[in-house]
Image (cartoon, rainbow, N blue to C red):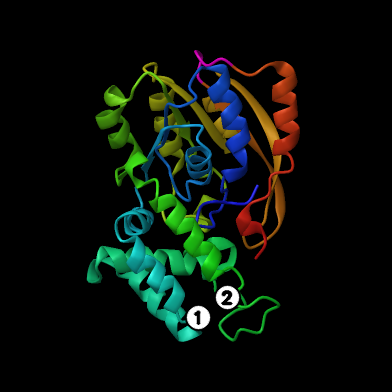
Amino acid sequence: MPSQSPLRYPGGKQKLAPFVVEILKANTLVGGHYIEPYAGGAGAAIELLLSGWVASIHLNDSSLAIYAFWRAILEHTDEFCRRIRSASLTVDEWKKHKEVLQNPEAYREFDLGFSTFYLNRCNRSGVLSGGLIGGINQTGNYKMDARFTRNELIRRVEGIAGKSQAITLSNLDTEIYLERELRNMPDNSLIYFDPPYYEKAHGLYLDFYHKRDHSRLADIIQAIDEVKWILSYDSAPAILDLYQERRSFTYDLQYNAATVYKGKEVFVFCDNLILPSASRLEYINEGLKQLQNDAAEV
């Protein structure tokens, strides 16, 4: 399934969309609201919206850089596409965008959003704090333009912007977001939690959690009974322990952010969620074993 998101994201979940579709069907949530408190690249959300499985998506991310990107493509689409067409793919230009990300307060929000996009497409595995594809001397097998496919990226941006009326954005800490918005979520909503990984998170994200944050979040999520929710995590023993009273299943996943390694992830389900039939769940589980991140390629 080709990604519809313009961002390459560590742990990107666009290929989980078929699994989420099964959840939507089983719980009569097709055509409803889909919420991602940790939006990131929002791969699954964008796929579900553009495919018509949900009527609206609600994207929240506590990272100002990620929020600035989404605002830029939704509210300044033409300018953003012009910048994609004219972007200089040189090491000197890369350094300029890196400086913007390191000093966001010195630049307008649009520039922060475009620099976030630029580094995401030009850095190894899409990691914003990572190194340049091909290295500073551009001597690697891949060069920095390997994932900067201008026409395709413009197509994705324009496709998403065409659905802007169905997209709600916010830039809040997840706990604050839930406190403010949970009561306003319609009954036909599904929340998908995809928090930063428990392990290796410091090498993948600009913002990551400490152990106490994961524990506090687990208490908050498991207390939600207003709407249905699902959650995915890396399958660390500490995470399995935090959610041991909830239904879950694990699946294999190969990560390629900087170095290739294999791990397991876990899906956790709220108590009032109807799960697909056992045969469908097994079919989906087999599919998830083949999941590869867009960031895996370089």
> What is the distance, in whole Å, between disc 1 and disc 2 at their CAs?
6 Å
Q: Residue at x 39, y 45 (%)?
A: 163
Does the rendering let one see residue 234? Answer: no
Residue carrying label 1: 89
Q: Foreground: 163 or 279? A: 163
Q: Quadrant of the C terminus?
A: bottom right
Which image quadrant for residue 21?
top right
Q: Main secondary structure of the magenta part?
A: loop
> In the figure, 268 relative to 146: above or below?
above
Q: Locate residue 278 relative to residue 38 in the image: left or right.
A: right
Name the secondary structure under disc 1: loop
Residue at the spot 49% in from the left edge and 13% down from the top edge: 272
Q: Position of residue 153 (x, y in %)?
A: 51, 63
Question: Which residue occupies 50% across, 80% down?
Answer: 89
Helix, strand or loop status at disc 2: loop
Amino acid found under the numbered disc labelled 2 = Asp
Q: Which residues are magenta?
A: 270-274
Question: Which mark is drawn over residue 145?
Answer: 2
Front-most of residues 137 and 274: 274
Counting from the top left corner in percent of width and height, residue 152 is at 55, 63
Q: Position of residue 72 (x, y in %)?
A: 33, 59
256 is within the stretch colored magenta: no
